[in-house]
Amino acid sequence: MSYVAMAEVAEKPEPQAQPQPLVSVRGLSVAYDAGRVGWWGKPRKIAALDGVSFDIFRGETLGLVGESGSGKTTTGRAVLRRIDSTSGSIEFQGHDITHVNGVALRQLRRHMQLVFQDPYASLNPRMRVLDIVAEPLIAHGFVRKADEARDEIGELLRLVGLPHDAYDRFPHAFSGGQRQRIGIARALALKPEFIVADEPVSALDVSVRAQVVNLLQDLQQELGLSYLFIAHDLSVVRHISHRIAILYSGRLVELANRDELYENPLHPYTEALLSAVPVPHPKIQRARKRIVYRGEIPDPGHWPAGCHFHSRCPLATERCSLQAPPLVERTPGHFVACWHR
Amino acid sequence: MSVDVTSEMPLLEVDQLSVEFDTRRGVVHGLRGVNLSIGRGETLAIVGESGSGKSVTAQAVMGLVDVPGRIAGGDIRWKGRSLLSREGARAARDIRGKEIALIFQDPMTSLNPLLKIGVQIGEVLQRHLGMTRTQAQTRVLELLEAVGIPAPPRRAQQYPHELSGGMRQRVMIAMAIACEPQLLIADEPTTALDVTIQAQVLELIAGLQESLNLSVILITHDLGVVAGLCHRVAVMYAGRIVETGEADDIFERPAHPYTQGLIRSTPRLDDRLDRLIAIDGAPPDMLSPPSGCAFRLRCPVADAVCEQEPPVLSFINGGSAACWRPSNVAAVVETAEVTIQALP
């Protein structure tokens, strides 16, 4: 089954009443401008994402895992319409939002928000917490001044577990974990249905990471949120995701239910990614067979032909270097893009 | 994997080391009496969160504590000789960089962007071993080969920005082992790298340790990295070592509540828990650390005793822990053993 065929299946209502996805992405590609070669040269494009398709259902967390340069952040931004895609489509609540702009796009932004990776860089140090959290409300015209939203923001701060006197303090007075809570409160201010969390715990200390992951889970329960949870390895996503998608060099290589992915990975890259995460237990870790592939992740713009992973893959044959494998459903709900698995 | 360290004097001893930083808001107590020792061929992990003092320990050993920081007390001994005393300080200049080498977290900021890789590594050889430039250039190629960089002659002619993060870290390691050090201090060597590249770099460090009989101090916040590589572990919290011992013992029978919390809150690939178990609160402000045990405000078993006096390291579970109420119960292991499953 190709991307197209997969899209068709998803559109047909299944007999057991498959619910309609909240977010539906089909064949999404993104390329960045890379300037010109010389004054009169043609503008160059660097491909960052190459035909990515997935669905996110209501109340679901889709974990999106990839290493640097895989296009995971690009995916998050493109789905939120922060950057333009070169081809493919994005549907939100059944409406095609690939090309909406102007007022419609502004209205759309209320429903989908972003939580950033770095809680130190993403909060303005000169703004009070009250102003930071109220800013989306002001930008969307719900209130004119931050002080008008005091009660509402107090409720938000309570929801994310910040002390109620946090209002008038500045970001520097808070620890990394608390800053990330401020970022989450800001994302929640407009009561969105969908949140893209771009490595929200990567910059935090280990003991605090668990707090923020648990908070995101609680908020999902309480508010019925859907998440696209972006991560660079497979350790944290296991605890928060319902399904997990693996990106390699701009393409999805595997997509499966959480436990299925960990217990029965099909793509050789997923196997390498799983074995690369060390288990914090010396005896188990020593007994594990680590799969370490030689070579490095190709830079965007320098992807090999055929399967992007073939230059590092132990299973690669001639076919892999010529033809890109499509993402096909091997067992129900378990998609993989590999000629040999 | 056990290493006989009792037969000879430890290579490096850190004795009651205190480091303070003078800031406008007051004195920050970076290290508050740290004791460490490492023997030949041994790998010691220093584990802790940001601000726990793990990097400051490494900087103090390398003589890199600079204004506003200062060493407020204690001693650092290399093969029994103080590096801090007046006469020791002169010898220290030759020891550091030659017998003790350091790898930093971020290879991009610690390499000179204006110098070719080959020249930078060659500089170390010329400075410490008195090689000529041509001698150094031949040795550079051998070193690049040793750290697994393909096509050394071509790479030696490149600048740091032309290499990927993993390659840069390999260059840093090549530079560190250039003078055949006896001790390698790696300060979060893989934090900035992707996981599959991290696995390659850790494998390289483990391999070099075997082949060169290096002692390694690995500084990290990631317990997973520790588990695969280290013989002994020292867990730091708020400028003190709160628990230390053999890696196997610490992971199986952690005695300090902080160590237990750290192990429990580290997400694992091989468990199916839907919820992580977090440690409440945040690390203390080192301008005014709490009285008594620094962990007591976040500790699930803290009581009145913990408020009064800071606990000292005492022997328990085969290692030692600084806690008034250490537990003998293998609390973490119980949950872990049940959920262990076949890993791919």
Image (spheres, coloured by chain):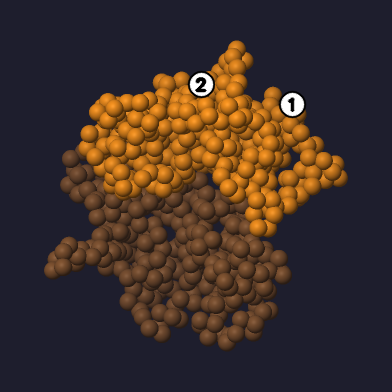
Asked if badges 1 and 2 are on one and the same chain, I answer: yes
Left or right, B121 with reference to B309? left
Residue tagged 1: B315
Specify the quadrant of the image occupied by residue A273: top left
Q: Give the chain letter for orange.
A: B
Q: Give the chain letter for brown.
A: A
Q: Marks 1 and 2, Cα distance to the nearest angstrom? A: 24 Å
At label 1, the amino acid type is Phe
Residue A154 appears at what percent x and percent y? 68, 74
Q: Which mark is residue B41?
A: 2
Of residue B91 and residue B250, the one placed in the foreground of this image is B91
Under tag 2, what secondary structure?
A: loop
Which of label 1 and label 2 is nearer to you?
Answer: 2
Residue B18 appears at what percent x and percent y? 67, 39
Q: Quadrant of the N terminus of chain A?
A: bottom left
Q: Residue furthest left?
A: A40
Q: Classify 10 Å Cα crowding around label 1: few (below 14), some (14-19), many (20 and above).
A: some
